C-alpha cells in the first residue's frame, strides 16, 4: 500500500516539478530584491505565508479574494480550451457588478426576502457577464475579429460605464465622496451575501458549486467535448459536424458569465455597493489575477482552484508584508509574474521533449 | 501555442547559427566542401551504428540496432509503420538523442547532437514532406540559410549559381534555377531538396519515404537520378515501406520490425515473398492478399446493383474565389458499389468532397442521398443521414492531437444516443459506454496505443489512420466517402483498409473512393470516373478498365 502511494507520488513529481521550480525561482529572485532593500527576506516570506494561512482574519481575507479570482480564472480558462483568449474578464466582472447594483437598487424600496433576492442578483450578475461577452463572441464567430482585441475594448467601455453609474443621479451616492472614488448608494441588507465565518461570505459556496460544475462540464459534457475538439483541431471538428460558431459563442459567453458572477459576488459580498476602482486589489484588477492563475495551471479545471487560492494567499500576504515590514507589495507581484513566466517556460520545454 | 514556440525555437537556432557565422565572418572562407567528394572505395563501410536503443513512453522504438552502410550503395531500410526506421534515421541525423548506442563514421566514433553536427559529418536528410519556401526561386531556396563568402548583405547569388549549376550537372539533377518553387511539380521540388542537401556538402543522403507524394513516372525519374548520384560517389539510405520500390532501386536492404533488425539482404537473394515475411511476419498471406494481387479483371466481390442509386451528384458546380473549381460534375453510386474517382491531386477533388459533406456551398446542382437533397444541409445533418467520411489529410482534418484516443474515436458520433445522455438540461458523455466502445474498437482495429486514454498525438501515422477507419466503420452508414484511405500506410495497414472497404461493399454501402494510387482503384472499383479540372471527363466500367486510357483521361486527353 505504502509502496503504491510512493509510486504514485513518483509519477506525480515530474508533473509538479516545473511548478515547484517556478515557485522557488520566483521567490529566489524576490528574496534578492528584498535583501537589496536591506530587509530580511526570510521574515518577509514567513509573513507572506503565516498571515493568510495562520490567522483567522487572514484566512477570511484570503477566501474573500479567492472567490472572484477563481471565477475570473474560469472566465479565461473555459474559452481557452477552444483556443479563444478571453482577456475581458475585467470588463465582464465590472458589468456583472453594474447590473447587480442597478437591479438591487431599483428593488430596494420593497426588497424581496434574502433567500430570493440573493439568488436573483447572482443570476443577474451571471447573465450580465454573459451579455458583456456576447459582443466579442459574435464579433469572433461572424466577423473573425480576434477576441483579444475585442475583449480589451470592452474592458475600457466597462470601466467608464462604472464611472458613469457611480456618479449619475438615481444610483450615485451624492454625499461625501468615498476617498475620492465615485460610488453608488449601498444595496439593501437583503441583497448582501450572508457572512460565512472564517470562509468570508456565502460567495465561497457559489464558487465551489461553480468549480464543480465547470469540472463536470469540461470532463463529461458534450459541450466540453466540443470545446476541446475545436481547441485541438478546428478543421477536424468542422469536418465531423461540430459547429465552430456555436462553440465560439457558447464558450466565450460562458466565460463572460463566470466573470459576471465574480463581479456580482464582489458587490454583494465585499463592498455592498458599486465603487469606481473596486476591482483593484493591491494594484491590479481581479480579472488580471484570474488570468494569471489560469495561466499558472494551464487552465486545468482541477488546478485552477489551487492556483487561485495560492494567488489570493500571496495577495493577502503581500498586503500584510507591506503593512508590517514596509516592503512594497509590488515586490510580490514581481514574484507572481516571474512564477507565471517560469511555469510557462518549463511547461513548453517539457512539451518539446 | 506549441506551433508558436516551435517557430520561436527555430528562429533562435537560426540566430545562434547566424551568430556563429558572424564570428568567423572575417576569416578566409575554406574551399567549398562539396567539390572534394572523397573517393571512398566501394564496399568500404562509411556509416555504422552499434546498439542503438531509443525508448519513447510505452514503446521501444529502436532496440539494440546494429546497422552498416557501405560507400556507394543504395541501402534500403524497409519496415512497417512504427518499425523504427524514421526514429533510427532521426538519431543519425541528430534530431533525436539515442538512449544507448554508438555511431561510427569511416570507423571513427562520433557524437551527433543536432542536424548541424550531422551536416559536418556529411550526412544529409530529406524528409517525407517538402520543406521549401514556395514563394522563393529554386536558387534562393538552395542558398537560403547558408554561409556566404561575400559579406552579410546581398544574396551573392551570382557566385552561388555556378556552384549549384556544377553540382546539378554532376548529379544529373537539372532544374530551372530561377523558377519559383510553387510552380514546380512535387517530383521536381524533391530534386530541389536533394540538391540543397548536396550543396551543404552531404555525402550520405537519407531519404525518408521519398515516393509518398510522387506519381509513377516521377518515381521512375527519382530512381534514375539516385542511380546517377550513387555512381558519382554518394551513398544513399532509402527509407520505405514499399517492397516493390525497395527491390527496384536498392543494392542492399535492411529490414526492421518492431524496433529490431530482422535481417540484411543482398539484392541477389531478395524476393518479394521473403521481404514480406521478414517485414510483416506471416500475418499477410500473399496469395490471398488484395494489396499484392495482380491487376486482374476478376471481381474481388460481386456487385449487387439495385435500380435506385444511393448517392447522386447532379450537375454540381462549385466556385472558389469566383472561379469554378468543380464544373458540371455528375455521377451516381449504387448500393454495394465502389465508385473510384481517379485524378491528379488538385483537380477539384477536395472541393467536391467538401461540398458533399457540407463544408462548402454548391453554386449549382444537387447532391442526393437516398433521394434526399443534402445541398443546403449542415455537416452535422449530412453525417446523420448515414454519410461517413474518411478525410484525406488525417493530420489536418481527422485527428484531435491533444485529446485522448477514446474521444477521437467518437468524434462525429458523440451526439449519438449511444454516447450522449440528457441530464440536468444538458447533454453528457456516457463515459462507460465511451470507454467500452473505444476498447472494443482499439482491439478490433488493432490500434497500437498504451490505452484508450493516451493522447492521439503520440500515435504513429498508421495508427491514426486506423482511428479514422474505426471511427468511420463503427457507425451505420449508407454512403462512405473515403479520400485516400491508404495514403502513407504500410503493407499490413493498407491490406487492412482494403479489406474493410470490400466489407463495406458487401454490406451494401455505396462507396466513393478517391486515391492517388491508380493500381489500388483498378483493383477495388466497380466503376471509375476520371476527374480533370473539376470535371468528370470520362467514366469506365470495370470490364473496360485500362490503365493508360484512364491515365490519359486524368490528364485531360480524351480517348
Image (tube, coloured by chain):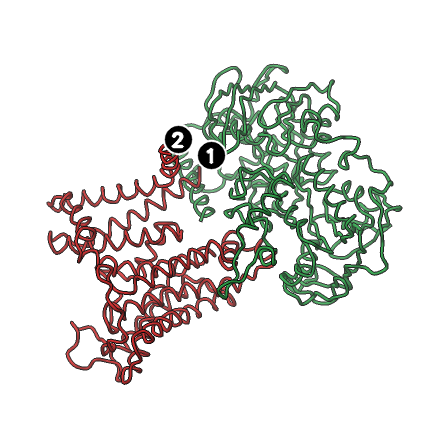
Chain colours: A red, B green
- Could you give the CA–CA distance between mark 2 and mark 1, rounded to whole angstroms? 10 Å
Q: Is mark 2 on a helix, strand or loop?
A: loop
Q: Is residue A8 above or below residue A114?
A: above
Subunit under mark 1: B
Q: Which of marks 2 and 1 is nearer the N terminus?
A: 2
Give the labeled residue for mark 1: B147
- Visible residue check, residue B279: yes
Residue positioned 50% across, 47% down in the render: B402
Toward which corner of the image does residue B315 lie, by quadrant?
Answer: bottom right
| Nearer-the-camera pick, B45 or A93 | A93
The numbered disc on residue B307 is none
Give the labeled residue for mark 2: B24
Mark 2 and mark 1, same subunit? yes
Disc 1: CA contacts within 10 A as few (<14), some (14-19) or many (>=20): some
In the rendered image, residue B114, in percent from the top left (x then y), is placed at 46, 31
In the rendered image, residue A152, in percent from the top left (x then y), is placed at 37, 65
Toward which corner of the image does residue B479 lie, by quadrant?
Answer: bottom right
Q: Is residue A166 above or below residue B546?
A: below
Subunit under mark 2: B
| Nearer-the-camera pick, A53 or B216 | A53
Callout 2 touching callout 1 (CB < 8 Å):
yes
Amino acid at each position: 500500500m505504502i509502496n503504491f502511494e510512493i509510486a504514485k507520488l513518483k509519477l506525480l513529481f515530474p508533473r509538479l516539478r516545473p511548478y515547484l521550480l517556478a515557485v522557488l525561482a520566483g521567490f529566489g529572485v524576490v528574496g534578492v530584491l528584498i535583501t537589496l532593500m536591506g530587509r530580511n527576506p526570510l521574515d518577509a516570506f514567513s509573513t507572506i505565508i503565516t498571515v493568510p494561512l495562520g490567522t483567522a482574519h487572514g484566512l477570511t481575507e484570503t477566501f474573500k479574494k479567492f472567490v472572484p479570482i477563481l471565477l475570473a480564472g474560469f472566465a479565461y480558462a473555459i474559452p481557452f480550451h477552444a483556443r479563444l483568449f478571453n482577456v475581458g474578464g475585467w470588463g465582464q466582472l465590472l458589468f456583472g457588478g453594474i447590473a447587480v447594483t442597478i437591479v438591487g437598487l431599483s428593488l430596494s424600496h420593497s426588497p424581496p426576502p434574502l433567500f430570493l433576492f440573493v439568488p436573483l442578483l447572482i443570476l443577474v450578475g451571471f447573465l450580465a457577464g454573459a451579455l458583456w461577452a456576447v459582443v466579442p463572441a459574435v464579433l469572433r464567430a461572424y466577423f473573425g475579429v480576434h477576441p483579444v482585441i475585442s475583449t480589451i475594448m470592452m474592458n475600457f467601455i466597462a470601466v467608464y460605464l462604472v464611472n458613469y453609474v457611480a456618479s449619475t443621479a438615481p444610483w450615485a451616492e451624492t454625499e461625501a465622496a468615498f476617498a475620492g472614488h465615485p460610488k453608488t448608494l449601498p444595496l439593501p441588507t437583503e441583497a448582501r451575501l450572508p457572512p460565512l465565518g472564517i470562509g468570508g461570505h456565502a460567495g465561497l459556496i457559489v464558487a465551489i458549486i461553480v468549480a464543480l460544475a465547470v469540472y463536470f462540464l469540461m470532463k463529461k459534457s458534450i459541450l466540453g467535448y466540443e470545446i476541446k475538439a475545436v481547441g485541438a483541431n478546428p478543421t477536424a471538428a468542422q469536418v465531423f459536424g461540430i459547429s465552430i460558431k456555436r462553440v465560439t459563442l457558447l464558450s466565450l459567453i460562458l466565460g463572460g458569465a463566470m466573470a459576471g458572477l465574480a463581479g456580482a459576488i464582489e458587490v454583494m459580498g465585499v463592498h455592498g455597493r458599486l465603487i469606481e476602482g473596486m476591482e483593484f486589489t493591491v494594484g491590479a484588477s481581479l480579472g488580471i489575477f484570474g488570468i494569471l492563475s489560469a495561466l499558472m495551471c494551464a487552465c486545468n479545471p482541477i488546478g485552477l482552484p489551487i492556483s487561485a487560492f495560492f494567488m489570493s494567499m500571496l495577495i493577502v500576504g503581500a498586503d500584510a508584508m507591506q503593512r508590517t515590514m514596509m516592503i512594497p507589495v509590488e515586490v510580490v507581484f514581481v514574484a507572481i509574474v516571474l512564477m507565471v513566466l517560469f511555469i510557462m517556460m518549463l511547461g513548453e520545454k517539457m512539451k518539446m521533449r | 501555442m506549441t506551433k508558436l514556440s516551435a517557430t520561436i525555437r527555430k528562429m533562435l537556432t537560426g540566430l545562434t547559427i547566424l551568430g556563429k557565422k558572424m564570428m568567423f565572418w572575417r576569416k578566409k572562407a575554406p574551399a567549398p566542401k562539396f567539390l572534394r567528394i572523397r573517393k571512398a572505395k566501394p564496399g568500404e563501410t562509411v556509416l555504422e551504428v552499434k546498439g542503438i536503443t531509443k525508448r519513447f513512453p510505452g514503446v521501444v522504438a529502436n532496440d539494440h540496432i546494429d546497422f552498416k552502410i557501405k560507400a556507394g550503395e543504395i541501402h534500403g531500410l524497409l519496415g512497417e509503420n512504427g518499425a523504427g526506421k524514421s526514429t533510427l534515421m532521426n538519431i543519425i541525423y541528430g534530431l533525436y538523442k539515442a538512449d544507448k548506442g554508438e555511431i561510427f563514421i569511416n570507423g571513427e566514433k562520433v557524437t551527433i547532437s543536432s542536424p548541424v553536427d550531422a551536416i559536418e559529418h556529411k550526412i544529409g536528410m530529406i524528409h517525407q514532406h517538402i520543406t521549401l519556401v514556395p514563394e522563393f526561386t529554386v536558387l534562393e531556396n538552395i542558398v537560403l540559410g547558408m554561409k556566404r563568402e561575400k559579406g552579410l548583405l546581398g544574396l551573392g547569388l551570382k557566385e552561388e549559381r555556378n556552384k549549384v549549376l556544377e553540382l546539378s550537372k554532376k548529379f544529373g539533377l537539372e532544374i530551372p534555377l530561377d523558377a519559383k518553387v510553387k510552380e514546380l511539380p512535387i517530383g521536381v521540388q524533391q530534386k530541389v531538396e536533394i540538391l540543397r542537401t548536396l550543396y551543404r556538402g552531404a555525402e550520405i543522403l537519407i531519404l525518408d519515404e521519398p515516393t509518398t507524394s510522387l506519381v509513377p513516372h516521377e518515381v521512375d525519374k527519382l530512381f534514375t537520378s539516385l542511380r546517377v548520384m550513387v555512381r558519382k560517389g554518394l551513398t544513399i539510405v532509402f527509407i520505405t515501406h514499399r517492397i516493390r520500390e525497395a527491390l527496384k532501386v536498392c543494392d542492399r536492404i535492411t529490414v526492421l520490425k518492431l524496433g529490431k533488425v530482422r535481417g540484411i539482404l543482398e539484392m541477389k537473394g531478395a524476393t518479394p515473398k521473403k521481404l514480406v515475411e521478414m517485414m510483416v511476419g506471416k500475418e499477410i498471406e500473399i496469395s490471398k492478399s488484395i494489396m499484392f494481387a495482380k491487376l486482374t479483371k476478376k471481381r474481388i466481390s460481386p456487385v449487387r446493383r439495385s435500380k435506385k442509386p444511393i448517392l447522386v451528384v447532379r450537375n454540381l458546380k462549385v466556385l472558389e474565389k469566383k472561379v469554378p473549381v468543380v464544373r458540371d460534375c455528375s455521377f451516381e453510386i449504387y448500393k454495394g458499389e465502389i465508385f473510384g474517382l481517379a485524378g491528379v491531386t488538385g483537380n477539384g477533388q477536395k472541393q467536391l468532397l467538401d461540398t458533399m459533406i457540407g463544408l462548402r456551398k454548391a453554386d449549382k446542382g444537387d447532391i442526393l442521398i437516398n433521394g434526399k437533397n443534402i445541398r443546403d444541409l449542415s455537416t452535422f445533418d449530412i453525417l446523420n443521414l448515414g454519410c461517413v467520411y474518411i478525410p484525406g489529410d488525417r493530420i489536418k482534418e481527422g485527428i484531435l492531437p491533444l485529446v485522448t484516443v477514446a474521444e477521437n474515436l467518437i468524434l462525429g458520433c458523440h451526439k449519438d444516443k449511444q454516447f450522449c445522455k440528457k441530464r440536468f438540461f444538458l447533454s453528457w458523455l456516457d463515459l462507460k459506454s465511451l470507454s467500452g466502445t473505444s476498447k472494443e474498437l482499439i482491439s478490433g482495429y488493432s490500434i497500437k496505443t498504451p490505452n484508450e486514454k493516451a493522447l492521439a498525438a503520440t500515435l504513429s501515422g498508421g495508427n491514426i489512420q486506423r482511428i479514422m477507419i474505426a471511427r468511420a466503420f463503427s457507425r451505420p452508414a449508407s454512403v462512405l466517402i473515403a479520400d485516400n484511405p491508404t495514403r502513407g500506410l504500410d503493407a499490413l495497414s493498407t491490406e487492412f483498409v482494403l479489406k474493410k472497404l470490400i466489407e463495406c461493399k458487401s454490406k451494401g454501402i455505396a462507396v466513393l473512393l478517391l486515391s492517388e494510387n491508380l493500381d489500388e482503384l483498378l483493383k477495388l472499383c466497380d466503376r471509375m470516373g476520371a476527374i480533370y479540372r473539376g470535371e468528370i471527363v470520362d467514366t469506365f466500367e470495370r470490364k473496360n478498365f485500362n490503365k493508360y486510357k484512364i491515365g490519359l483521361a486524368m490528364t485531360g486527353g480524351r480517348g
